[in-house]
Image (cartoon, rainbow, N blue to C red):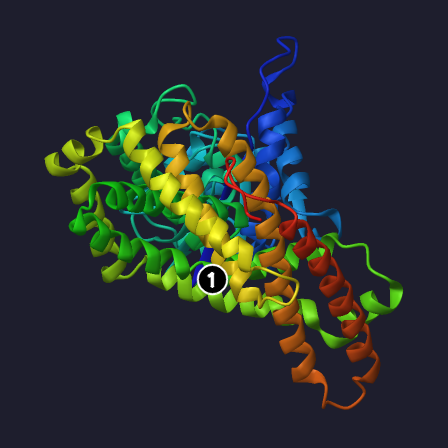
Amino acid sequence: MKYLYLIRHAKSSWADDSLRDDQRPLNSRGTRQLGAMGRAIRAAGVLNGPIFCSNATRARQTLDGLIPEDLRQNTHIVPELYTFNYKTLINWLRNRQDEDSITLIGHNPALEELASYLLQQAPDSFPTCAFMQIALPVKHWHKLARNKGRLEQFLTPKDVSYEQFNRKRKKMPGGNDTPLARHIPETLQHQYLRMRDLETGVIRGFDSEFLHQYRIAIRRSRAIAESVSEISGDSNLRKATRALKRHAQATSQLRDLHVLLADLERWQLEEGTESALISSGARSYFANLADLEHQALAKRLCSRKYQKDMDEWFQLITSHHFEKTGRKLTTGDIRKALDKRIKQHNAQARQLSTQSPDDDYHSLRKLLKRIRYLAELDKPAFRAMLRQLKQRQQRFGDFQDLHVQIEMLTTFRDGIATEPDMFEPVAGLNDLIAGLASEKAGVRNDILTLGGIDGHPVL
């Protein structure tokens, strides 16, 4: 079995008419395509064999951006690969020797037509900086034949980079000056399509921003539907949101691990604490946990149950009954529901103290989120309140993140405490946990001074 990896150069510039075609460099978009794609193709195994690159400037810059110089042990610049004719590539490949895998960095239409020659069903297009892995059931490269290859993997920048995915995406219906209540069905349909489009990036797992945006879409969908259900009393809608809640909750652990891993890289730590993280293997431990959580989430998103839930959700939000329900909402209805939630919030806030368990703060955070989503049904009417709610949510979110991080680090510390030679790492972890606990106490005090919402007194 032979493996062929095809990489099309990243997006190139046409700004300078005086340059020959082979001298054209990458443009800014092409440069931005490289980071996430580099991680993806290295994970796919392109470094296991030789890499052959066209001598065109845009191809060589793609090679430089995808694969760091210290990892390029077996790379070759081949002028013959600067071609737009797939037959040239086939002839070149047939003259290769015993390499088990070969990576080509080249140009369209040659790469796209080469894939069409080797595969029975090739992708419809081969965008800039895209990557294709093809398995070839041959012992020698000169045995290459039409339609004998098997597509193992096909990735585009939009699959692995949220920034590239989000280019020129359609915005939600309406705007800040239009009450959401006037276009709830359209908004939920937009969020549904966004969730489905984001799933590929979540499953691929190369950019954590896909998961973050997916969580926003599914939680916002649930919150809007729950708000409509609360105001309208629609029991069918309330039932339908339970599936969204389950799927949203299934993303929480992975999100928390992503935040912790990012913070472990971001924090400016004392030398002893940094040494403790290294010697204890904490980063590897949490990275492995994140990998396991990602595998479980990817399996969920590919399951029949998930697909069924999403299909049923789409049928509901596109139904005539739901459209009628959404159109009936008024600012008065929203204000009534808001007043009820705000009074509930302020009653709970009055019970908070420095001695209250973290669960009480967590409960108030969730209630605050529901209040905000209710207010977002009519942004023009509740714009001032929304600014206040966003600031409050930020502090509650900080508190929750610190709570989770302390729990995860404490569990890890306890797990290694009895192992030999772990006295110093445990001491370093204790310092980190104590620092986070002190920061959490400060956030707790900030929350206790926030007061009531929208003029409703807490004291």
Of helix, strand and loop, which one carries label 1? helix
Camera-side residue: 196 or 174?
A: 174
The residue furthest right is 271
Q: Which residue is found at the position 28% from the left and 34% from the top?
A: 333
- Amino acid type of the residue tagged 1 in the rendering: His
Quarter of the figure with the N terminus: bottom left
| Residue 318 locus on image (x, y percent) | 17, 37
Relative to 195, 4 lies left or right: right
Q: Disc 1 marks which residue?
A: 294
- Point out the residue furthest to the left here: 320
Query: Image height check: is 115 above or below 356?
Result: above
- Eyeballing the image, is 454 above or below 67? above
- Asked whether residue 100 appears in the rendered view, the answer is no
Seen at 43% across and 47% down, the residue is 343
**Picture quarter containing residue 99?**
bottom right
Q: Position of residue 84 (x, y in %)?
A: 47, 28
Q: Nearer the viewer, residue 447 or 88?
A: 447
Residue 49's x, y, as percent? Answer: 59, 57
Side of 375 where 351 appears, left or right: right
Q: Is residue 429 above or below residue 376?
A: below
Q: Position of residue 110 (x, y in %)?
A: 44, 33
- Label 1: few (<14), some or many (≥20) within 10 Å? many
- Comparing 25 with 138, the one in front is 25
